[in-house]
Amino acid sequence: MTQATAIIVGANSLLSREIAKQLSEQGVELALLAQDPDSLKNFCDSLPNPVHLFPLNISEPSAIISTIESVWQSIGGAHLVLVNTGQNSYNSALPWLPEQDIITVNVQGFAAICNTSFRLFKEQGYGQLAAINSIAGLRGGPSVAYHASKAFASNYLDGLSMHAQRLKLPITITDLQLGLLDKAAMQKSRIWLSPPSEVARQIIKAMKAGKRRVYVTKRWRLVAWLTKLLPEFVYNTRHWRTKAERLAAKAEGKK
Ligand SMILES: NC(=O)c1ccc[n+]([C@@H]2O[C@H](COP(=O)([O-])OP(=O)(O)OC[C@H]3O[C@@H](n4cnc5c(N)ncnc54)[C@H](OP(=O)(O)O)[C@@H]3O)[C@@H](O)[C@H]2O)c1
């Protein structure tokens, strides 16, 4: 392989498309995996370097494993696999089904993707596995399964990194700990929200530097540090209501 190649799993999200665009502009050949590949055709046509599109089904581990294997075969291996799949929802009544969906995608699906990619990198003899994760995994939180799934992802990547070191293989594992991003890219004045283009730029920079774990954007390192530091009785008194719920409570005259 002369040209750098990257597989992006979960390519339809705004952030994935921004990363794909910047990587393509830097000369990387891409394989994009999305639930609805047809919806990405126009986007792919706009990219300056070769792009291959593949369908993605995360719910069944055997399906995701064979998809990654066949993508790998068809593009002749890859330098980078970037995982950007995830589900999140919040319902204070904690119904089971959304929790189950989050666990299926963020835990079972995530592990199947990372395990398969690691095995393929091992056979190839090198590579980088990077995953877009969240600082939500640092502690439990209101989206119970989501927070726990992000802790799982972090721990899973720790294990793979240890495994690579023990095998003395040049396989880099990068845990990209995201804060929040401004998906609409319309709230530029808000200090904590960065537009996807800036988030993508920092993610690519961290991957190129072979970072093991990085906070994106950088300012979220401070929040991560505080989150870990807060004593339980302070952390637990944080208000978990959504903005709409807070406004409704205010209108009703509640605290
Ligand atoms: N948005 C934020 O502010 C934020 C903050 C911190 C961390 N993150 C992390 O960033 C990652 C992506 O989040 P996002 O906000 O960008 O979410 P998103 O826009 O909803 O993207 C999620 C991705 O996962 C894919 N996906 C979800 N369920 C799937 C399934 N059953 N089968 C196949 N693909 C599935 C989606 O594919 P389709 O588009 O094809 O449905 C999409 O590409 C997550 O790991 C999240 O924890 C996001």
Image (tube, grey):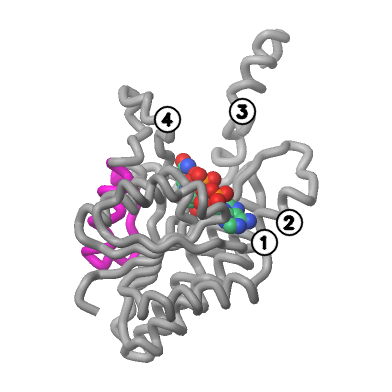
Q: Residue at x 22, y 52 (%)?
A: 25
Judging by the rendered image, the residue that carries numbered circle 2 is: 100
Q: Residue at x 55, y 65 (%)?
A: 110
Give the Cα separation between the discs numbered 1 and 3: 25 Å
Question: Residue 210 location in percent, x, y?
Answer: 26, 67
What's the amino acid at mark 3? Thr
Q: Secondary structure at mark 3?
A: loop
Give the answer, above or below, for where 103 lies relative to 201. below
What's the amino acid at mark 1? Thr
Q: Nearer the viewer, residue 55 or 108?
A: 55
What's the amino acid at mark 4? Ala
Question: Residue 103 location in percent, x, y?
Answer: 66, 59
Query: Mark 2 or mark 3: which comes first in sequence?
Result: 2
Q: Nearer the viewer, residue 137 or 244?
A: 244
The quarter of the rendered structure image containing the N terminus is bottom left
Q: Nearer the viewer, residue 98 or 137?
A: 98
Give the answer, above or below, for where 84 lies relative to 223. below
Q: Find out whether the residues at labels 1 and 3 contact each other: C-beta distance under 8 Å.
A: no
Query: Mark 3 or mark 4: which comes first in sequence?
Result: 4
